[in-house]
Image (tube, rainbow, N blue to C red):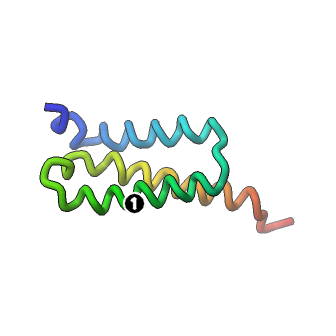
Amino acid sequence: MMCKYLEGGWGVILGSGVILGLAFIDLPFSLWRVLTAVALLITAAMLWHPRLRHFILLSSAMALGSGAVLLLKAMLAWPVFP
């Protein structure tokens, strides 16, 4: 029953909401790298699991969101125009 609710945009909204909540905590750069790597590995593992395949938007949205936060943190740490 729960998989029907998370197949659509709810998986993206929930995953992005988690990343947005973590962004306000101001986690260090290395922890964002670990979160991105773990989310990518979970996404790859969920592709082959028959039941977890329905929830793949959760982990892929978290990987995309944490990668975007990593890029923003990197741009703020190393400015292009000093």
Please determine whether, in this image, residue 80 is positioned above or below residue 1: below
Q: Residue furthest top?
A: 1
Please determine whether, in this image, residue 54 is positioned above or below residue 18: below
Q: Please state which of residues 13 and 39 is positioned toward the viewer in this rendering.
A: 39
Residue 45: x and y in percent read: 27, 60
Residue 37 falls left or right of residue 9: right
Identify the residue shown where x is 53% and y is 57%.
34
Residue 21 falls left or right of residue 54: right
Q: Residue furthest bottom?
A: 80
Q: Secondary structure at mark 1?
A: helix
Quadrant of the image occupied by residue 8 = top left
Neighbourhood count class around disc 1 (C-alpha, 10 Å): few under 14, some 14–19, many 20 upward: some
Identify the residue shown where x is 34% and y is 56%.
42
The N terminus: image quadrant = top left
Question: Mark 1 sits on what residue?
Answer: 40
Number of labels in the image equals 1
Residue 41 falls left or right of residue 2: right
The C terminus: image quadrant = bottom right
Identify the residue shown where x is 74% and y is 56%.
76
Residue 29: x and y in percent read: 65, 55
Identify the residue shown where x is 64% and y is 45%.
27
Quadrant of the image occupied by residue 46 = bottom left
Q: Amino acid at mark 1?
A: Leu
Residue 72: x and y in percent read: 64, 55
Q: Please state which of residues 7 and 30 is positioned toward the viewer in this rendering.
A: 30
